[in-house]
Structures are given as C-alpha cells and as structure tokens.
Image (spheres, helix red, strand yellow):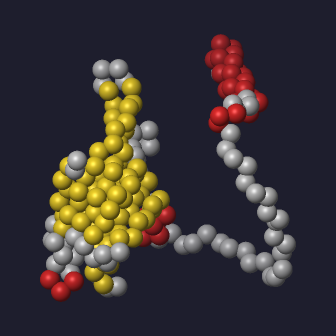
Amino acid sequence: MSNRLRLASVSAFAILLTACDAVSEATPSPEAETPARAKVAALAASGVTQTLAPAPADDSLQASARVVRVDRLTYDDAKLFGTAGGDPAMNGLQTYLAFFVSPDEGWTIFRIGDVLDYTVLSASPGRVELDLQDSLLDVATGTIGSRHRKVIVAWTPGAEGAPPAAVTVTPGA
C-alpha cells in the first residue's frame, strides 16, 4: 500500500471515528425526549434456563420474519399485512390483503401496494377503507416528500365462503 493511500485510509478512519463520537456525545433537545417509562423491577430467575438454537433454514419462516404488521379484518376471514421490503427511504411497506382458504391451500393474497404506512379507516363485509401514506420523490429537486391518499378496497366474496376472484382499489374522497 502506498504512503498516500495509507494516509488517506487513516484519515478517513479518523473522520469516521470522530463522527461516531460526535453523535454519541450529542444531547437530545427537550422536545425530542421521549416520556420516561415507569420503572418496573427486573425479573428474578426462578427456574431452569433453556438455551435456544437458531431455527433450521426454512423459506416460509424467512418470509414470515419479514412481516412487520398485521391487521385482522373481522369480516370475510381476511387480513391486511405488510412486509418490510424495497427502499426504506421511499416507502418500503409492501402491503397485501389476504383471504384464508384452508389449512391445505393457505391464503389467497392480493398486493395493495408499496407504501410508507397505512391506517384502516373502516371495514365492512367486502370492503375496507384505507388512508395510505406514501413517500414521493421530486425528481427536479431530489427531495422526498409525503402524501396521504384514501382508497376503497373492495371485493365480492366467492361462492360458499371462497376467497374473491379479484379485488379492486378505488381512490376515495
């Protein structure tokens, strides 16, 4: 390694360490502080300790670990769920509507979209109203902004309790 490259590497490392120290020494402003939690006494061990090993590699288990949100709908044996994915700076909550079919067949799943977050406004048989929060990139300025949009997600249940063949998403006002 040349002396110039070695000096550049050491300088870059020193800058990184300095930046880390600056962050760790910073004190949050009073507005940024979170409310103090009530102190709870720590638990005392009272039984035999069990040591856990990692679960065996399993694709379905890996996919399950990506689920970060679930909202069960009380009608139609359905649920909304979101998985972490995509670019977290621009949305990243892959949002789905799923209908249970059977233990053997699993779920019928419809993709709602890639959003930052969602709020269930109301739910009724064959319909759920959502407030979707999206990140938007202004290409001209490179700035990321946000918007809220309301949508109506609707479906017609299949025959004899089967999942719907299709789901529609309509802008709401």
- Rendered-image quadrant of the N terminus: top right
x and y percentages locating residue 68 in the rendered image: 47, 59
66 shown above or below 142: below
x and y percentages locating residue 111 in the rendered image: 27, 59
- The residue positioned 44% from the left and 54% from the top of the image is 84
Q: 54 or 152, which lies in front?
A: 152
* Residue 20 shows in the view: no
x and y percentages locating residue 117 in the rendered image: 40, 50
Left or right of 156 in this view: 109: right
Where on the picture, by quarter, is residue 2? Answer: top right
- The residue positioned 22% from the left and 70% from the top of the image is 126
46 shown above or below 23: below
22 shown above or below 162: above
Q: 37 or 77, which lies in front?
A: 37
* Residue 32 shows in the view: yes
114 shown above or below 69: above
- The residue positioned 68% from the left and 73% from the top of the image is 52
- The residue positioned 40% from the left and 46% from the top of the image is 116
x and y percentages locating residue 64 in the rendered image: 45, 67
The image shows a total of numbered marks equal to 0
Left or right of 33 in this view: 132: left
